[in-house]
Image (spheres, rainbow, N blue to C red):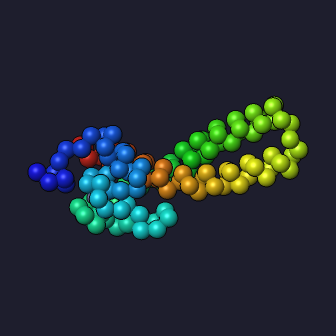
Amino acid sequence: MDSIEAPTTWTTSFMRGCRRKCPRCGEGAMFRGYLSIADHCSACKLPFEPLRADDAPAYFTIAIVGHIVVSGLLMLESYAHPPTWVQLAIWLPSTAIMSLAMLPYLKGAVMAAIYCSNKDA
Ligand SMILES: [Zn+2]
């Protein structure tokens, strides 16, 4: 039995998606750019077009980054009381960097979750 026919658990497929790899085989890349989805897996030919994540990755990114930034901002304010420009200088670039870093991986994870929910149907 090769890796394409091997049964995969939800966790395995999800972790493959988190690495931006095909959720079925774990070999082919899901993306051909930063957020551009490849037509299909280069290894097992799984079509990625039906795995439409829509806005869900952005919602998850906002939720995660928002919790980190707001809690960090409030902790810094309560312990150090820095001037506003210091808070802005820390948290605006942090927000942009964390959002841009997380978004493609969360998109892969959402696409893998969609694949897992559809593969047994
Ligand atoms: Zn594949």
Which residue is at a point 57% across and 47% down the rendered structure image? 61
Q: Nearer the viewer, residue 118 or 14?
A: 14
Q: Quadrant of residue 32?
A: bottom left
Considering every residue shown, the one lying at the far top of the view is 78
User: Residue 27 sits in which quadrant?
Assistant: bottom left
- Residue 59: image location, x then y, percent: 56, 46
Q: Would residue 12 appear left or right of 91 to someone viewing this image?
A: left
**Residue 80 visible, this orientation:** yes
| Residue 69 in the figure: left or right of residue 9 | right
User: On the rendering, which quadrant does ligand 1 occupy?
Assistant: bottom left
Residue for point 32% across, 51% down: 23
Q: Is residue 49 visible?
A: no
Q: Residue furthest front?
A: 80
- Camera-side residue of 85 and 104: 85
In this rendering, is residue 76 above or below 85? above
Specify the quadrant of the image occupied by residue 2: bottom left
Residue placed at 53% from the left, 53% from the top? Answer: 103
| Residue 26 percent location from the top left of the image | 30, 54
How many marks are shown on the rendered structure? 0
Q: In the displayed image of the protein, which residue is found farthest to the right? A: 83
Q: Position of residue 36 (x, y in %)?
A: 46, 66
Q: Position of residue 70 (x, y in %)?
A: 71, 39
Which residue extends farthest left?
A: 1
Q: Residue at x 47, y 52 (%)?
A: 105
Placement of 31 over or under 93, stated as above or below: below
